[in-house]
Image (tube, rainbow, N blue to C red):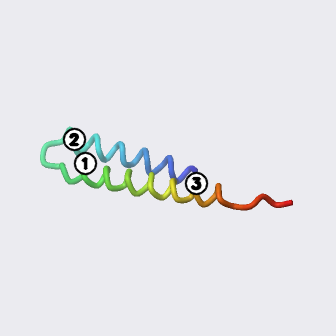
Amino acid sequence: MAIFLFLILTAIVLGLIGAVADGLGYLLVIGVVVLVADVAFFGTRLSRRSHRRPVR
């Protein structure tokens, strides 16, 4: 969970720097890609976790 939050924070910071600074639009793109990859990774982990059988 800590890695997920770290990557979300990194994506937000990169996106803000890319949106504000002149000529650094590529940082905005990198931030969006990191955000989408992180959410997709977290979604697959969450869906795999819910399909497990309970231990008796």
Provide the residue designation for mark 1.
28
Q: Please identify, in this view, whether the residue under mark 2 or under mark 3 is nearer the observer.
A: 3
Q: Secondary structure at mark 2?
A: helix
Q: Residue at x 13, y 48 (%)?
A: 23
Q: Residues within 10 Å of mark 3 (few under 14, many from 20)?
A: few
Q: Residues within 10 Å of mark 2 (few under 14, many from 20)?
A: some
Q: Position of residue 49 (x, y in %)?
A: 64, 57
Distance of mark 2 from mark 3, alpha carbons? 31 Å
Q: Secondary structure at mark 3?
A: helix
Q: Are marks 1 and 3 in contact (CB under 8 Å)?
A: no
Q: Mark on residue 46?
A: 3
In the picture, the quarter occupied by the C terminus is bottom right
Q: Position of residue 36 (x, y in %)?
A: 37, 53
Distance of mark 1 from mark 2, alpha carbons? 6 Å
Provide the residue designation for mark 2.
19
Q: Residue at x 40, y 57 (%)?
A: 37
In front: 18, or 38? Answer: 38
Q: Amino acid at mark 1?
A: Leu
- Would residue 51 appear left or right of 3 to someone viewing this image? right
